[in-house]
Amino acid sequence: MADPPKMAVADLDAWYGARQVLYEVSLAIPDRAVGAIIGPSGCGKSTFLRCLNRLHEEQPGARATGAITLDGEDLQSKDLVTVRTRVGMVFQKASPFPNLSIYENVAAGLRLLGVRRRDELDEGVVEALQQAGLWAEVEADVDAPGTSLSGGQQQRLCIARALALQPEVLLMDEPCSALDPISTNKVEALITQLGRSYAVVVVTHNLAQAHRIAGYTAFFYLGKLVEVGPTATLFDHPREKLTENYITGRFG
């Protein structure tokens, strides 16, 4: 019998005001795997991701209906701090907290959760930076501003900041789109590694990247989930003609 999904989305509809942007999306998100969400601009990829940790509802006039569960528990019944702790988010543009050091960027979430002892903070910060593959690069200068790092390092710092809260799911919205090829390679390697421990969902416009990092891929078009399956199968033998047309570059 297959393992139950880490997250399950059922009949998700989403709106911005009167404009509907997602239509009856249902998707099972497995644990310890990387999933890619692909599709042309405006197809609802990022909105879907933001619904998973309830960021969507914070936009003026935005709303969503349907069910989203984490380990079988309805996320709508949880307070937002709990949701954001269990379901971490990394955005397209690296955004270290301004005026905070590398150390304090990672420690900030731990402090919000009530961690006060310096040894516990140190342990959490080091572990998160190690998980993000950044510790060896910043160990000697953790008191430097987070904004002093390169773009790729800043993105890995933001990943470390999310990991410090020990989430169960990690969402990433175009995490490499602003990075150079070398930094992209490092972040992609990190995503692959994190997929061994977390449920990771990555929105990407880069089809080659989806092929490299994802165990399964979901194709969205005009707010609907058209097809989902193992990445190699979806790319090599798509079931839907629309999927084939997109991945072969006939539109997008």
Image (cartoon, helix red, strand yellow):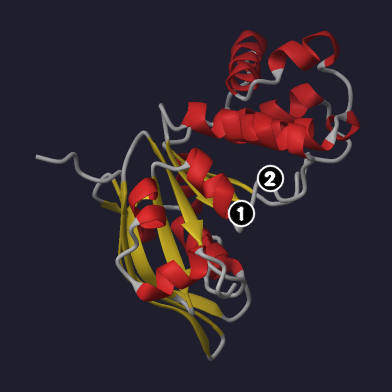
Kindly indicate the quadrant of the structure image that contains residue 31: top left
Q: Is residue 113 visible?
A: no
Q: Is residue 59 left or right of residue 144?
A: left
Q: Position of residue 184 (x, y in %)?
A: 70, 37
| Residue 217 visible in the picture | yes
Spot occupied by residue 29 in the image (x, y as percentages of width and height)? 34, 49
The correct choice, above or below, for 12 with respect to 116 in the image is: below
Quadrant position of the N terminus in the picture: top left
| Disc nearer the start of the sequence (1/2) | 2
- Measuring from the top left, give residue 247's x and y in whole percent: 50, 63
- Label 2: few (<14), some or many (≥20) within 10 Å? many
Q: Name the residue beneath numbered marker 1.
A: 206
Residue under the point 57% across and 48% down: 208
Q: Nearer the viewer, residue 100 or 216?
A: 216
Mark number for residue 176?
A: 2
Report crowding for label 1: few under 14, some 14 to 19, many 20 or more residues within 10 A (C-alpha): some
Q: 218 or 127, which lies in front? A: 218
The relative height of residue 55 versus residue 177 in the rendered view (above or below) is below
Type of amino acid at the residue the image marks with label 1: Asn
CB under 8 Å between callouts 1 and 2?
A: yes
